[in-house]
Amino acid sequence: MRLLLALEDGLAKLLLGAIVVLVFAAALGRTFGHPLIWSVDLAQLLFIWLVMLGANKALRIKAHVGVDYFVRKLPAGLRRWLEIALGLLTLAFLLTMAWQGARLTMLNLERVYGDSGISYAWVTGAVPAGCLLLAITLAAHIVRSLAQGARGETLVFARPDEEMAGASHAAE
């Protein structure tokens, strides 16, 4: 599992580096009168894949922004079950997006993306791939929360209160 996480992080870093190089090369090319028209299209394509990898990492470490002021005031048991219910609802949404995204990808196989000559399916394919990745991560959080049961407070989306308090003090 650690190998897959390292691979995901490495791929995200590689994509970010490639985007920076492509955008910089495009700017230099335009400056000297030789624009690289395809480079911006490719940078945008890589960006959507980077966003999906970043969203998955944020979900994995429970770093997505959430407004949980009222939820944190609930008793621990109720709060845990509310998070599980919302997790299941989100999981259904992600699986629906993956299914519809796969259908959209198949419809875009022949479409060409901008001036790059690349199939637009590479762009739309990031949606089902990213949603499946997010669904797997979310399912793991839900299973972990259910498995722990009443033994502790393992939440689906939020970090434990103690960890959040430490994070807020570290920021001060």
Image (cartoon, rainbow, N blue to C red):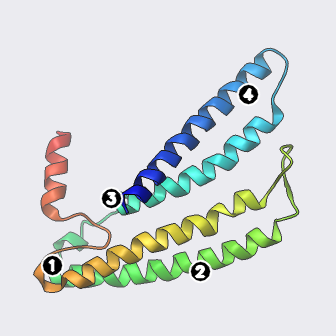
Q: Residue at x 34, y 56 (%)?
A: 63
Mark 2 secondary-structure assignment? helix
Circles 1 and 4: CB atoms closer than 8 Å: no
Q: Which numbered mark, 1 or 4, is in the foreground of this view? A: 4
The quadrant holding residue 31 is top right
The quadrant holding residue 61 is bottom left
Mark 4 secondary-structure assignment? helix
* Residue bearing the label numbered 2: 96
Q: Quadrant of the C terminus?
A: top left
| Left or right: 26, with 47 as reference point | right
Mark 3 secondary-structure assignment? loop
Q: Amino acid at mark 2?
A: Thr
Badge 3, how many Cα within 10 Å: few under 14, some, many 20+? few
The disc, 4 or 2, on the residue closer to the chain's N-terminal end is: 4
Q: Residue at x 14, y 45 (%)?
A: 169
User: Could you say where residue 168 lies in the image, as x and y percent from the top left?
Assistant: 18, 48
Mark 1 secondary-structure assignment? helix
Give the alpha-carbon distance from disc 2 to disc 3, as whole Å. Answer: 23 Å
* Residue bearing the label numbered 3: 61
Q: Amino acid at mark 3?
A: Ile
Badge 4, how many Cα within 10 Å: few under 14, some, many 20+? some
- Residue 50 versus residue 157: which sits nearer the camera? 50
The disc, 2 or 1, on the residue closer to the chain's N-terminal end is: 1
| Left or right: 162, with 122 as reference point | left
Q: Residue at x 67, y 72 (%)?
A: 101
User: Could you say where residue 113 lies in the image, as x and y percent from the top left?
Assistant: 82, 52
Q: Disc number at residue 26?
A: 4
Badge 2, how many Cα within 10 Å: few under 14, some, many 20+? some
| Left or right: 138, with 165 as reference point | right
* Residue bearing the label numbered 1: 76
The disc, 2 or 3, on the residue closer to the chain's N-terminal end is: 3
